[in-house]
Image: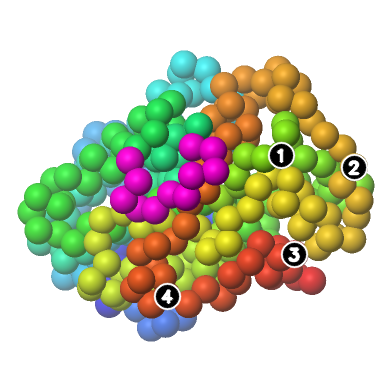
Amino acid sequence: MKVVVAGSSGLIGTALVAALRRDGHEVTRLVRRPAAARDEFTWDPARADLDQRALRDADAVVNLCGVSVGRRRWTGSFKQELRDSRITPTDVLASAAAESSVPTLVNASAVGYYGDHTGDRVLTESSPAGTGFLAALCQDWEAATEPAATAGVRTVLLRSAVVMAPHGGMLGMLRPLYSLGLGGRLGNGRQYLPWISLDDEIGAILFALTTAAISGPVNLVGPAPVTNAEFNRALGRALHRPTPFVVPAFALRAAVGEFADEAILHGQRAIPAVLEEAGYTFQHPTIGAALTAALGR
């Protein structure tokens, strides 16, 4: 396949490009700096500036663009940045894919689609959208793919969980603390933490790219959901460190504001119904296996 990737320099994008090339696919990367290699095209989504030659003969476009939601405190300006970094590139790529008749668009989204107060309810891809800033962001993000879907482009929406990766991401922040024995649950610990290993994140994207029967939303989550307290214990076991501490809700709210309620103190008990029904086999089906793989233990 010839696959065009936007957002190729991030944690997921870097791993995806490497996996695509390892499997023999041709990759074209969209970059926002001057193109420095034969496989790169410069684009400027804010100006809707995309050279259609980048999509010529492409079999698929993968869009992973988006500023990390935990990058800094959620001010009004940063929330707008979160929206602009996701919705604008998606709209540009969806329109370009439609114009160029690209067969497939695989677009990032997140399990935040289901909202911040879902409790113990099991969530599949057919579950309704929730409430809150993240839920509204994900709804608008996914809606921006409409030009492609309307044109008949097979459109896959990757509702991704927290990725357990060897470097960067949430584990990159937590590992130093837990290694020092400073780990602990957050709030009451009963909120669900949707997770997926990096290997399965990439494996599921490749599976979606090459499985024509898959379209619409796809939960990129591990098949065995865990609560924050269960994750805390699993990470402590993986690092052979105690996890005695509790970070109370009020302290989290004081430290990170609105992000605490939307992304830390509440979660989603999402399951990968579409992937499992389509026959995807998880390499790391439990949080213990995912942590062992990520931590090299």
At mark 4, the secondary structure is loop
Whether tag 1 and tag 2 are in contact, CB under 8 A, the answer is: no
**Does label 2 or label 3 sit earlier along the sequence?**
2
Q: Amino acid at mark 2?
A: Pro
Q: Quadrant of residue 208?
A: bottom left
Span highlighted in magenta in the image: 118-128
Q: Nearer the viewer, mark 4 or mark 3?
A: 4
Q: Is residue 293 left or right of residue 53?
A: right
Q: Which residue is mark 3?
A: 295
Q: Dot 2 surroundings within 10 Å: few (below 14), some, or many (20 or more)?
A: few
**Does label 4 or label 1 sit earlier along the sequence?**
1
Q: Which residue is mark 2?
A: 244
Query: Please, is residue 16 above or below residue 283 in the view?
Result: above
Q: How far from the left and from the top, in percent, is residue 150? A: 9, 50
Q: Quadrant of residue 1?
A: bottom left
Q: How far from the left and from the top, in percent, is residue 20? A: 41, 74
CA gap between label 2 and label 3 equals 21 Å
**Residue found at the very far front of the displayed protein:** 121
**Does label 4 or label 2 sit earlier along the sequence?**
2
Q: How far from the left and from the top, in percent, is residue 155? A: 23, 57
Q: Amino acid at mark 3?
A: Leu
Q: Which residue is mark 4?
A: 280
Q: Nearer the viewer, mark 2 or mark 3?
A: 2
Q: Is residue 179 left or right of residue 282?
A: right
What residue lies at 65% left-to-right and 47% top-to-bottom? 227
Q: For the C terminus, give its image quadrant.
A: bottom right
- Can residue 6 be seen at all in this image of the molecule? no
Q: Is residue 229 left or right of residue 153?
A: right
Q: Amino acid at mark 1?
A: Gly
**Does label 3 or label 1 sit earlier along the sequence?**
1
**Does label 4 or label 3 sit earlier along the sequence?**
4
